[in-house]
Image (cartoon, rainbow, N blue to C red):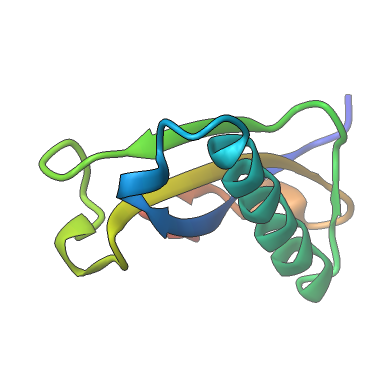
Amino acid sequence: MEETGTLFGWAFGDAARADEPGYLAELRREALENATQDAVRRGFEVEAGEESYAVLQPGETLVDVENAPDRLVVRCTVKLTGPGSENVHAVGPMNG
């Protein structure tokens, strides 16, 4: 079995647009792209179809949403593959 790790990606949006059709999907795509770019910079690949998403709200997370632009934050967690990926784990609000 291949060892894997995890990594977060982020997208920041306008809370006033959260109910617009397609807006959260757009932010999810941005968060996935952010995570994928970070993984590539670190020398890893992202396992397609294994991503998960969370919309973070003030008071529900360690992330300081109060300082986020317009207080809408989408986090994407991806599964990493490749040598050394088992040493990288998304924990709390950070990538370790």
**Residue for point 87% across, 34% down:** 48
**Image location (x, y in percent) of residue 10:** 52, 57
- Report the residue at 87% width, 55% height from top: 83
Vertical placement of residue 33 versus 56, above or below: below
- Is residue 2 visible to us here? yes
Image x and y of residue 47, in percent: 85, 37
The picture places residue 59, in percent across and down from the top left corner, at: 10, 41
Foreground residue among 90 and 18: 18
Asked whether, in this view, residue 21 is left or right of residue 69, the answer is: right
Q: Is residue 5 left or right of residue 60?
A: right
Left-right relation of 96 to 45:
left
In the picture, the quarter occupied by the N terminus is top right
Q: Residue at x 52, y 57 (%)?
A: 11
Q: Is residue 90 above or below residue 41?
A: above
Q: Is residue 92 visible?
A: no
Q: Name the one closer to the observer, 39 or 57.
A: 57
| Total marks placed | 0
Q: Quadrant of residue 79?
A: top right
Residue lying at the far left of the rendered structure:
59
Which is nearer the eye, 8 or 84? 8
The quadrant holding residue 12 is bottom left
Residue for point 41% across, 31% down: 19
Q: Residue 64: x, y in percent?
A: 19, 60
